Image (cartoon, rainbow, N blue to C red):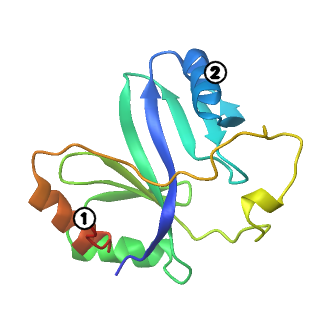
């Protein structure tokens, strides 16, 4: 069984990387943490990044999910194989798609360097106003039963609403 800990990040494709990086930083209080080629990484608080902007045809690229402690990438790969889900392992993560083709990245559990809550930390590189974390991702779907089954049976989520 795959056990997810939390949303790690969302990857969005954007037409103009420089413009999107500036806009997301100003509009939502995100802080740029890195830029590498056609990708920019923005963070809410102290995580490596919460938003990965990718230059390309605009739209959703993938959602990254961090696995819980004790659930390894290898465990997750075996689980996907048992469910017949095509996947690829690269850069220490697993990549696959849900039934509608939405990209999914499964990342290994990552211990936090500092367990104090965001509000209790201080650092000069983050602005005073900023979101604490990425809390949810919304998708529109025309195949709700199939998607719900995938996310509950394959990714181990629970239906709440």
Relative to 75, say whether 17 is above or below: above
Q: Is residue 4 left or right of residue 161?
A: right
Residue situated in front as seen by the camera: 29 or 155:
29
Relative to 40, say whether 100 is above or below: below
Q: Residue at x 28, y 45 (%)?
A: 139
Secondary structure found at label 1: loop
Name the residue that disc number 2 marks.
22
Q: Place residue 127 in its image quadrant.
A: top right
Q: Is residue 38 left or right of residue 1?
A: right
Q: Distance of mark 1 from mark 2, alpha carbons?
A: 34 Å
Q: Which mark is residue 161?
A: 1
Q: Place residue 21 in its image quadrant.
A: top right
Closest to the camera, between mark 1 and mark 2, is: 1
Instruction: Tell me the quadrant of the picture where the C terminus can be found.
Output: bottom left
Query: Which of the two discs, 1 and 2, labels the residue nearer the N terminus?
Result: 2
Residue situated in front as seen by the camera: 36 or 102:
102
Secondary structure found at label 2: helix
Residue situated in front as seen by the camera: 144 or 94:
144
Instruction: Tell me the quadrant of the picture where the N terminus can be found.
Output: bottom left
Label 1 crowd (10 A; few <14 / some 14-19 / many >=20): few
Q: Residue at x 58, y 21 (%)?
A: 23
Relative to 130, say whether 47 is above or below: below
Label 2 crowd (10 A; few <14 / some 14-19 / many >=20): few
Q: Is residue 7 left or right of residue 19?
A: left
- Which x, y percent locates residue 65? 46, 60
- Which x, y percent locates residue 91? 56, 54
- Which x, y percent locates residue 22? 63, 21
Q: Residue at x 78, y 40 (%)?
A: 128
Q: Residue at x 53, y 32 (%)?
A: 53
């Amino acid at each position: 069984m795959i056990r997810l800990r939390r949303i790690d990040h969302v990857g969005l494709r954007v037409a103009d990387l420089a413009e999107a990086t500036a806009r997301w930083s100003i509009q939502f209080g995100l802080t740029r943490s890195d830029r590498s080629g056609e990708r920019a990484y923005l963070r809410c608080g102290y995580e490596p990044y919460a938003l990965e902007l990718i230059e390309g045809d605009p739209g959703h690229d993938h959602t990254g999910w961090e696995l819980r402690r004790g659930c390894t990438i290898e465990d997750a790969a075996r689980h996907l194989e048992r469910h017949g889900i095509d996947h690829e392992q690269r850069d220490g993560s697993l990549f696959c798609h849900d039934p509608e083709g939405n990209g999914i990245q499964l990342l290994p559990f990552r211990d936090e360097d500092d367990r104090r809550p965001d509000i209790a930390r201080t650092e000069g590189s983050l602005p005073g106003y900023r979101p604490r974390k990425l809390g949810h991702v919304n998708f529109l779907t025309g195949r709700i039963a199939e998607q719900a089954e995938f996310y509950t049976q394959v990714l181990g989520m629970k239906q709440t609403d």
